[in-house]
Image: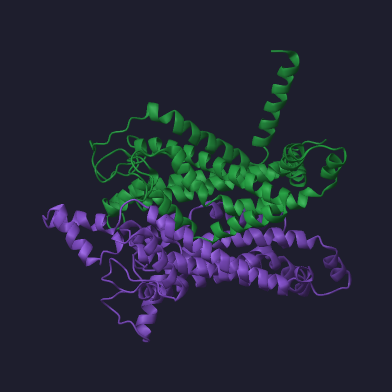
């Protein structure tokens, strides 16, 4: 590795470190998200999963069973760990597909204008009229057999893109006539150049944050669908664990069976909170005014002077 | 005035397109109500599947075997005369009757919580924006961000576990207790309904409140930097007058559009919240009709929701034009 690229790597690491330690909530957000990713991809190889109950049913969390056991005496920690991958992979895929659709359609509508704009705006409005979550249930019934991740992610993305496309379109409209775009146009640069090197980079912060938002919505729908039993049956899916705890374990009637309901709920809450903390840290990082203020107050806290 | 007509035509076109999409999507779903019920007759009653199929087809009036284009034409013709068809499952009950029993519950719970969360959000948003950067602002804002990220049904489950299962303060399910009260205008019924609606309303309110508060905070912060606020301060106006007449009003403006859109969604409710509380509203009926493939109910409910959403979007645009003169001048 050359000296220059080593330096660049060092700078990048420094930037990431600075981002991570910017605020308390960004530290927490980064640590939890990394923890979830680790659990999702390494966990399944370390933590065994037993589909047949071999323990006492309805045990509360303890050192032997980190997440307790369900009504059939199965260790819940294994289920949560194995289900984490599905949630994380699907939420990531869904948010990327949503963002891709929204950016493509929103930018096209904003740039082209005229009839194409009217048509794309109309499509967006139509999609926003159909009740989103019920639409997902209808589409999910068409997924049969083994759950195909890409297909499922596309279904979840269908309800996400319209709102996002609409706001990206209005952002494009406001950026379109700014000076730096006019400058590119006046020296004869093409539309493609202007889109990819002028407009999209200036929207990048907004796009990143709305991708995180899409991820949160994807987790909402994904778990919601499996709570209703609207997805192909998957033993380890968090929503299915909730569904089973209520319908088979009678968690709302049998206090001891509550563990199996509370554990996946807590897992969802912590995951959602960490994603939103991460997204609000991105917001601070991308917004120069907020970032300077945050860094200044951090320096003050640490008693440093510039 | 011309753009009003354009908006009206667009709204009609939106409803038409949506209705078509819904019709075709529903027909693309695998399985039908006969498949759903056949398992029961074959499994529980010991019939052969041919017997069961014949019986069920006869019972459901064979509407499923009509050619596709006939189904489409009759559906479209009926919709435009206001006839939503009859349910397949609930003994041929007209869909409109099912809507009439479901819609009041949903509108009741969702509208109370929508307005409660809107008002609370506005007050909290102004409060935090005025104390921008203070400890109370930070605490409230961080907790709003956190609550905003938690799915509403998770909040609902926690409320149910704590207040209904553990402490037994509120009921577990349904809209009223059939064994204890009689529907009608009597005090015990009204109290029972309110008692049953408390947890769903709290769930909706808590989960929506955070979003309103965050939005109001950010619009208020930007309005606070405007020249006319400085001018008002320079003129020596009272702080509370500036807060509500100058800052609050302008900061609320963008929120009214969203409020109008949300009002349209009052009729849809939340499938997942209604599922958690077994609350007999629109969301619950939609989920049930999808899983039993009761086409007429599905179509009817989707149609009603789509119409109300479109109309309220229209209303929102018109309202915004009235509130913000800049739009009218365009």
Q: In which quarter of the image is residue B156?
A: bottom left
Q: In this picture, is A147 found above or below B149?
A: above
Residue under the point 85% across and 71% down: B232
Q: In this picture, is B220 found above or below B108?
A: above
Q: Residue furthest left?
A: B46
- Where is residue A9 drawn, in percent x and y? 69, 22
Q: In which quarter of the image is residue B244?
A: bottom right
Q: In which quarter of the image is the C terminus of chain A?
A: top right
> Chain coloured purple: which letter?
B
- Where is residue A248 drawn, in percent x and y? 26, 51
User: Is B204 on the left-hand or right-hand side of B69?
Assistant: right
Q: In this picture, is B57 found above or below B78?
A: above
Residue B276 visible in the picture: no
Residue B72 visible in the picture: yes
* Camera-nearest residue between B287 and A289: B287
- Where is residue B50 drawn, in percent x and y? 16, 54
> Chain coloured green: which letter?
A
Q: How many labels does the image show?
A: 0
Residue under the point 28% across and 51% down: A256
* Camera-nearest residue between A155 and B205: A155
Residue under the point 36% across and 68% down: B280
Q: Which colour scheme is used?
A: by chain
* Camera-nearest residue between B51 and B207: B51
User: Is B48 on the left-hand or right-hand side of A101?
Assistant: left
User: Is B306 on the left-hand or right-hand side of B39?
Assistant: right
- Where is residue B75 drawn, in percent x and y? 40, 67
Q: Quadrant of the N terminus of chain A?
A: top right
């Amino acid at each position: 590795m050359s000296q220059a690229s080593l330096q660049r790597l060092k700078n990048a690491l420094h930037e990431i470190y600075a981002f991570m330690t910017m605020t308390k909530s960004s530290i927490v957000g980064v640590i939890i998200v990394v923890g979830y990713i680790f659990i999702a991809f390494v966990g399944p190889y370390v933590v065994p999963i037993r589909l047949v109950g071999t323990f006492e049913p309805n045990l509360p969390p303890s050192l032997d069973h980190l997440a307790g056991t369900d009504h059939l005496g199965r260790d819940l920690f294994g289920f949560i760990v194995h289900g984490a991958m599905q949630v994380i992979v699907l939420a990531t895929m869904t948010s990327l597909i949503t963002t891709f659709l929204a950016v493509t359609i929103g930018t096209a509508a904003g740039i082209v204008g005229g009839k194409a704009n009217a048509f794309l705006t109309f499509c967006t409005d139509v999609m926003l009229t159909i009740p989103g979550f019920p639409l997902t249930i209808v589409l999910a019934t068409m997924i049969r057999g083994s759950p195909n991740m890409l297909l499922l992610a596309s279904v979840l993305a269908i309800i996400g893109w319209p709102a996002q496309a609409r706001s990206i379109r209005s952002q494009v409209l406001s950026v379109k006539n700014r000076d730096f775009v006019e400058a590119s146009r006046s020296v004869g640069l093409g539309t493609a150049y202007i889109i990819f090197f002028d407009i999209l980079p200036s929207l990048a912060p907004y796009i990143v944050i709305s991708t995180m938002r899409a991820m949160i919505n994807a987790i909402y729908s994904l778990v919601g669908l499996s709570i209703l039993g609207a997805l192909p049956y998957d033993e380890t899916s968090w929503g299915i664990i909730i569904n089973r705890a209520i319908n088979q374990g009678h968690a709302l009637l049998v206090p001891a069976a509550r563990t199996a309901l509370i554990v996946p709920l807590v897992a969802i809450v912590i995951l959602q909170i960490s994603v939103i903390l991460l997204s609000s840290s991105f917001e601070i990082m991308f917004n120069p005014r907020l970032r300077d203020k945050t860094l200044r107050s951090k320096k003050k806290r640490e008693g440093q002077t510039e | 005035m011309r753009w009003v007509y354009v908006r009206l035509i667009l709204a009609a076109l939106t409803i038409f397109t949506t209705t078509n999409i819904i019709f075709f999507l529903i027909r693309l779903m695998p399985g039908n109500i006969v498949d759903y019920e056949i398992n029961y007759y074959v499994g529980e009653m010991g019939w052969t599947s041919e017997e069961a199929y014949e019986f069920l087809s006869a019972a459901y009036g064979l509407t499923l075997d009509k050619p596709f284009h006939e189904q489409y034409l009759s559906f479209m013709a009926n919709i435009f005369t206001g006839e939503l068809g009859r349910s397949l499952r609930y003994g041929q009950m007209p869909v409109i009757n099912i809507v009439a029993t479901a819609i009041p519950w949903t509108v009741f719970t969702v509208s109370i919580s929508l307005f409660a969360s809107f008002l609370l959000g506005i007050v909290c948003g102004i409060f935090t924006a005025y104390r921008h950067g203070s400890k109370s602002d930070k605490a409230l804002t961080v907790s709003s961000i956190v609550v905003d990220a938690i799915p509403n049904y998770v909040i609902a489950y926690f409320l149910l576990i704590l207040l209904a299962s553990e402490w037994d303060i509120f009921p577990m399910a349904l809209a009223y207790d059939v064994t204890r009260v009689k529907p009608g205008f009597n005090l015990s019924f009204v109290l029972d309904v309110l008692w049953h609606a408390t947890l769903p309303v709290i769930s909706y309110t808590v989960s929506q409140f955070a979003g309103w508060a965050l939005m109001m905070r950010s619009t208020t912060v930007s309005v606070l930097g405007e020249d006319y606020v400085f001018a008002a301060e320079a003129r020596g106006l009272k702080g509370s007058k500036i807060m509500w007449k100058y800052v609050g009003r302008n900061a609320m403006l963008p929120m009214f559009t969203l409020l109008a859109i949300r009002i349209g969604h009052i009729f849809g409710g939340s499938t997942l919240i209604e599922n958690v509380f077994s609350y007999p509203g629109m969301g619950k009926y939609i989920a049930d009709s999808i899983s039993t493939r009761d086409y007429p109910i599905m179509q009817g409910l989707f149609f009603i929701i789509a119409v109300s959403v479109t109309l309220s979007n229209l209303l929102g645009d018109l309202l915004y034009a009235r509130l913000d003169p800049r739009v009218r001048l365009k």
